[in-house]
Image: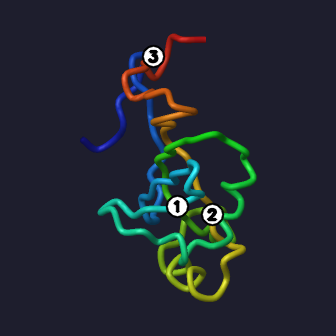
């Protein structure tokens, strides 16, 4: 497909160039996992601290960790450098709230529950 489909029946998601991750917060604290399940909390110290400030009982949030370039686009090369040298440049872009305060939200429709 050369271009995205048009019309009201489609929902489009922005494609970011970063690391897919999940933030897990519960009584054990905040942890950030890679797509493959590796605990990278220590690599994302500032993001873990920010997630702890959400004051949630528990949550699993699926998203992408990115760094923006000067034009506002995600930059994978800059992301790799920011992890070790410039934590303040990391952003977590949330895609899905999978669990919240003991409730499994994976079966909740994307739209229609307003």
Q: Residue at x 75, y 53 (%)?
A: 53
Q: Secondary structure at mark 1?
A: strand
Question: In what quadrant of the picture does the N terminus appear?
Answer: top left
Residue at the spot of label 2: 48
Specify the label residue 8 is tagged with. Answer: 3
Between residues 101 and 49, which one lies in front from this camera angle? 101
- The nearer-to-camera label among 2 and 3 is 2
In three-dimensional space, the C-alpha distance between marks 2 and 3, rounded to whole angstroms, equals 37 Å
Q: Is residue 95 above or below residue 80?
A: above
**Is residue 112 shown above or below 66?**
above
Q: Considering depth in this image, is 75 or 88 the residue closer to the camera?
A: 88
- The residue shown at (51%, 45%) is 61
Q: Nearer the viewer, residue 58 or 113?
A: 58
In-image side of 94 versus 37 (left or right) = right
Q: x and y percent of residue 35 in the render?
A: 34, 59
Instruction: Say if 108 sits above or below 50 in the image.
Output: above
Quick one: quadrant of the C terminus? Answer: top right
**Picture residue at 45% right of the left edge, 27% below the top:** 105
The disc, 1 or 3, on the residue closer to the chain's N-terminal end is: 3
The disc at residue 58 is: none
Residues marked 1 and 2 touching at CB (< 8 Å): yes
Kind of element beneath mark 2:
helix
Frontmost residue, 5 versus 46: 46
Instruction: Count neighbours of disc 1 (C-alpha within 10 A) and say few if under 14, some if 14 to 19, many if 20 or more.
Output: many
């Amino acid at each position: 497909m050369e271009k995205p489909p048009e019309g009201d029946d489609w929902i489009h998601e922005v494609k970011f160039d970063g690391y897919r991750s999940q933030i897990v917060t519960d009584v054990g604290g905040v942890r950030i996992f890679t797509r493959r399940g590796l605990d990278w909390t220590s690599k994302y110290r500032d993001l873990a601290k920010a997630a702890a400030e959400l004051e949630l009982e528990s949550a699993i949030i699926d998203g992408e960790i990115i760094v923006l370039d000067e034009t506002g686009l995600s930059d994978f090369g800059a992301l790799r450098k920011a992890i070790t040298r410039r934590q303040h440049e990391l952003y977590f872009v949330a895609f899905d709230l999978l669990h919240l305060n003991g409730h499994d939200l994976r079966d909740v429709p994307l739209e229609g529950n307003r």
